[in-house]
Image (cartoon, rainbow, N blue to C red):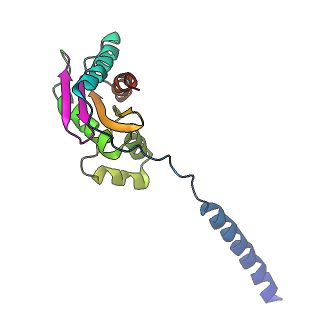
Amino acid sequence: MRKTTLVAPILFVAVVLTTGSAGAQQAAPAPPPLPPYGAPISLDLAKKVMAGAEAEARKNNWAMVIAIVDSGGNLVMLERMDNAPLGSVDVAQQKAHTANAFKRPTKVFQDAVAQGGVNLRLLAVRNATPLEGAVPIIVGGAMVGAVGVSGGLSAQDAQCAQAGADLVK
């Protein structure tokens, strides 16, 4: 009789653990494929992106630094608007490099770090700036570069960067 009273709880725990681990092992959906790198952004196209990002900043009275890199991560254009913070020069470039190198908006990194836990490992990734404010520039399905903006709140930076990138879609 003693064996029966021990077996029932053990079976219950085994069933619960098996059910829980089966649910945990379900595969997450695959992320969408990342765009391939394309030819480097031309100066004319970079000027359009810059104009769009600057127009958004001016419309909102935000003093921003805007950096555009090509698909190789090389700086093509940099603009520091009047009264934009000096420290934003480096930050805008770092954001643009991050979006280009990892083929995704920098908001992805900011959101991951904000979740904490194992995501804090991202802080150790060299040359990855986990601050919202940069997006890839996609033309014809290929990534030709990225635009990074700094000087305001992260969401404001991203708004300006997206406004610039949207002009060339």
Residue 104 located left or right of residue 65: right
Q: Quadrant of the C terminus?
A: top left
Which residues make up the magenta segment?
65-81
In-front residue for pair 99/2: 99
Towards the viewer: 77 or 154: 77
Residue 105 shows in the view? no
Comparing 101 with 70, the one in front is 70
> Residue 3, position in %: x, y?
78, 88
Q: Quadrant of residue 138?
A: top left
The percent position of residue 31, horizontal first and vertical second, equals 50, 49
User: Which residue sits at x=34%, y=51%?
Assistant: 122
Q: Residue at x 40, y 24 (%)?
A: 166
Q: Is residue 81 above or below residue 132?
A: above
Q: Quadrant of residue 78?
A: top left
- Which residue extends farthest right? 1
Residue 2 position, x and y percent, is: 79, 88
**Residue shown at 66% from the left, 70% from the top:** 17
Q: Nearer the viewer, residue 140 or 99?
A: 140
Task: Assess whether residue 68 is covered by the magenta stretch.
Answer: yes
Give the residue furthest to the left.
Answer: 86
- The quarter holding residue 69 reads top left
> In the image, 126: left or right of 1?
left
Q: Which residue is drawn at 29% across and 31% down?
A: 148
